[in-house]
Image (tube, rainbow, N blue to C red):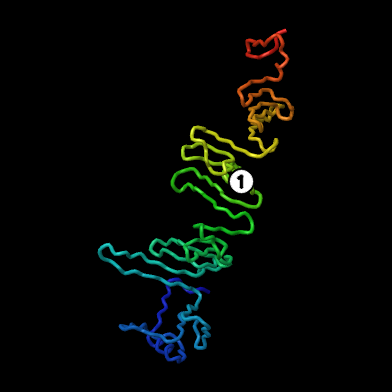
Amino acid sequence: MKKAMNSLHAVTASALALTALSVPFAGSASAAQVFTQDVIVQGSLCVGVDCTSTENFGADTIRLKENNLRIHFDDTSNSGSFPNNDWRIEVNNSQNGGANYYAIQDATSGRYVTTIEAGAPSNSIYVDSSGSVGFGTNAPNTSLSLHAADGNTPGLRLEQNTSSGFSAQTWDLAGNEANFFLRDVTNGSQLPIRVIPGADSGAFVISANNNIGMGLANNDVTADAALHIRRGGAGNDGLPRIRFENTDAPNVWVMDVSDNGDFRVSIDGSGVQELLISSTGAVTIPQLANCTNGIRSSAAGLLSCLP
């Protein structure tokens, strides 16, 4: 059974002296003793009711050994504006069935500010000599402030709770072999933003004046264009193209720029341009190409050939 949490254990003068002289001790002293001078122990020190006279210290210099392991930092400052908060290092819960952990407690407030559970994997938190922090890795990238490593979708969760009076909202920022994504956990885990591995540099750029560029390898978004799209390569696969698709309509419309600089509007897959503006400024509407008697416009603005 665990002893009461408020039990006090003192290392007595005689116990320290006997430890220093490597003389076995048989039990606790009858009363605590106070040292008014420095105490030096040339050897290892065991503190706790379960220490034995045959303790095998191995490489340990100080060992705490009993069923309630606590180190309390009690700051007695009581004048002026000197700091006086108390702190405690706590190992494992004292209740039957409690958790196994190493924790740093703000003893004044009773809050546990840092807790490490038993069984945490190696390098759960690792700070290298350059100040980079690794989670799950002992070799964080020195060009990054934070490096998370995991076998399945490493990520960062941003969770706003209701403690400040605002509605709860949770976002995940994560990545894996399929995509890098932003996930709206609160609203059905929708993925409003995704980036597929292999995307080129400058695939999506927002300039300082809020203009948007797509396919700009040098991030050179045109200053006077709200949207700047660039794509290179010969043939149909290299054309800058915009698709307009209404899932409730049968046709998909496409706007693109041909290899010779013509601007074209067509129904996807039709093989015919509904509108063509050449690089020289000539406008062609193929369906009206054979209008030998002229072109007319209806009240609705529809163009057709004169009979």
Q: Position of residue 199 (x, y in %)?
A: 62, 46
The residue sitting at the front extreme is 280
Q: 272 or 156: nearer the eye?
A: 272
Q: 13 or 272: nearer the eye?
A: 272
Q: Where is residue 108 in the image (x, y as percent from the top left)?
A: 38, 63
Q: Position of residue 299 (x, y in %)?
A: 63, 10
| Residue on which disc 1 sits | 200
Where residue 6 sits, quadrant-wise, is: bottom left
Q: Residue visible at 52% across and 32% down?
A: 225
Q: Position of residue 43 (x, y in %)?
A: 45, 86
Q: Is residue 152 above or below residue 123?
A: above
Dot 1 falls on a residue whose secondary structure is loop
Total marks in image: 1
Observer able to see residue 97: no
Circle 1: residue type: Asp
Q: Quadrant where the C terminus lies?
A: top right
Q: 132 or 125: nearer the eye?
A: 132
Q: In this view, does 285 lie above or below 44?
A: above
Q: Residue visible at 27% across and 62% down?
A: 81
Observer able to see residue 118: yes
The residue sitting at the left extreme is 80
Q: In this view, does 76 lie to the left or right of 25?
A: left
Q: How crowded is mark 1: few (under 14 residues within 10 Å), some or many (20 or more)?
A: few
Q: In this view, does 38 lie to the left or right of 290?
A: left
Q: Residue visible at 36% across and 82% down?
A: 32
Q: In this view, does 205 lie above or below 307?
A: below
Q: Residue visible at 39% across and 84% down?
A: 12
